[in-house]
Image (tube, rainbow, N blue to C red):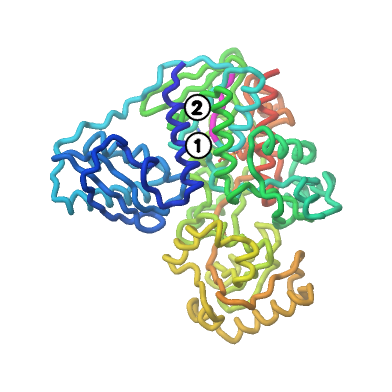
Amino acid sequence: MEMKKSSKISMLLSSVMLLGLYGCNNSGEETSSNDSAESSEGVQGTGSGYHGDIVAEVTFSGDQIEAIEIIEENENESLAEPVFTEMRDAMVEQNSTDVDSISGATGSSEGLKEAVDDAIEQAGVTLSAGESADSSSELEDEYNFDVVVVGGGGAGFSAAIEAAESGLDVVLIEKMPVMGGNTLISGGEMNVPNNWVQENLGIEGDSIEIFIEDTLEGGDHLGDPEMVEVLAENALDAAEWMRDDINVEFYEDQLFQFGGHSFQRALIPEGHTGLEVITKFEQKAEELGVEMFTETEAKKLIEEDDRIVGVEAENNGKTVTFNAENGVILTTGGFGANVDMRMEANENYDDRYLTTNSPGATGDGITMAREVGAAVTNMENIQTYPVSNPVTGAISLFADTRFDGAALINQEGERFVEELERRDVISNAILEQPGEYAYQIWDKALSDSTRTMEMHEAEFKKLKEDDLVIEAETLEEAAEFFDIPLDTFLETVEKINEYAENGEDPDFNHRAGLAPIKEGPFYVQKAVPSVHHTMGGLLTDVDTHVLNEDGEIIEGLYAAGELTGSTHGSNRLGGNAITDIIVFGRIAGQQVAK
Ligand code: ADP
């Protein structure tokens, strides 16, 4: 069995972890491409990355690049990670900056090229002709496994790990250069009724039944109650599995209450993003001997005698066959990043909308399964996330102060919606405001208590650079920055403070209570709705079998995660996606072992 790829992934993973532990300013061994390089004086060059400057120090030996050391960068830790390992190493190897960019991280790739080019120019070096890139596939033509899992997000890892724990030979293939999908770039919160943190915080009264009711109600009762029951009944067990088996660290003293939920019930992983989840999943999968291939895109399901027996995939232009003795599990995520597919499902969601999704969320699993007769359901229901970056479409985690009482106002300086309403309600309300955008406002006290600045400072810097947020010493300065009429703005803030104090919001009935806006600096952030989750997808049963138009099981084919369509009805509640992908991902992994 070929081991090369997975050891590469484990190296990549440990650098992701190092980056996570030691922050963004890297130097020294972790990033030096050539530890034995003699320490001849390097030249520093600067390029412009996605989150500010990238500074690289290049050492030369004659007309050859000897080493590239990353001195400074503030890029997304995990998405840009291959830029500072794989791509940097390719530059040294090929003695050229004309190497392939990392897909999904093109801004960071360009920034590194610019920085290294800058250093080359400053050093006055003309590089000797480099060796041409070897982009041919390292994979063999054909592999035999018990289980083929397609898509390396949270659902894929849950399925692969469960199947491997049952003793099966498992491969997990991922089309992007890094594992993780939307799970990785999410906040990572997981709704679990009756969880241990509720106990720690003295929160009483939550139950499986109330969680079911919230979830069904949140989806306008279009979700399949049987699926929702399975989701709710297995949530706690799934969370304990994440904590105890996968070693995910959750905060013991903090929970989230997303819109539409009756209780604070969302567990929060360390660092408050999906990085903790995916990092720990990769470690566990590695430990269990799950074979993992990135940049390997499933193209087609292989069918034999009415049974799915494998997947045809592509790696670096080469067609690779993965045979599956027991079955294929599709976990390719939703189709939020596929505008054509969105419009086919619901013409409303055209390219006026950006997306919070990873570029890999193109609905491939749905398309491949349809080709073998799978039925789909609920496709027209597409969710926008109300508070996203108006330039990139990215979800704003910096704006998570909303869940602890930050207010939304429009350009006139007025509130217009209850801030803990469902995502669809808030998104639609924003689109009815002048300019079809909103501002979120809060103060230092809320910033401190929610630790949003501490956890999402890189996002804040980027927003600031693009004039999408103001950190102002006075309310006057904040209003002026965005041209919001000062009188109305001050009146609104006064009302918010009064409502916060009285614990009552006669205007919009904020269910958990607004936070006061008293202590500078004050934050005002501009936001728009962006396509976030596609509720629709494959029709599956509670055992994750994919069903055909007649409601019959397609033998050998399983699906879990965002590509399935029956659970969330018209609208998926915040924090329910992680619960969904873990619960049903695990079931798929267990079922395929039967
Ligand atoms: P979920 O939340 O359901 O686990 P994610 O979006 O987190 O979904 O993960 C889905 C993963 O599947 C992404 O990493 C995505 O890049 C990957 N993927 C999508 N299409 C394919 C494909 N054709 N082949 C391999 N991987 C794919």
Determine if residue 442 is in view: no
* Start-end of magenta stretch: 147-152
Characterize the local packing of mark 2: few (<14), some (14-19) or many (20 or more) Cα atoms within 10 angstroms: many
List x then y, in percent, for residue 396.
55, 58
Q: Is residue 189 above or below residue 278?
A: below
What is the chief secondary structure element of the magenta stretch?
Answer: strand
List x then y, in percent, for residue 543.
72, 28
The answer to whether residue 490 is magenta is no
Residue at mark 1: C-beta within 8 A of ligand 1: yes
Count numbered badges in the picture.
2
Determine the CA span between mark 1 and mark 2: 9 Å
Q: Is residue 367 above or below residue 449?
A: above
- Tell me the residue that label 1 is attached to: 179
N-terminal of the pair, mark 1 or mark 2, is 1
- Tell me the residue that label 2 is attached to: 292
List x then y, in percent, for residue 198.
78, 51
**Amino acid on which the number 1 mark rests in the picture:** Met
Quadrant holding the C terminus = top right
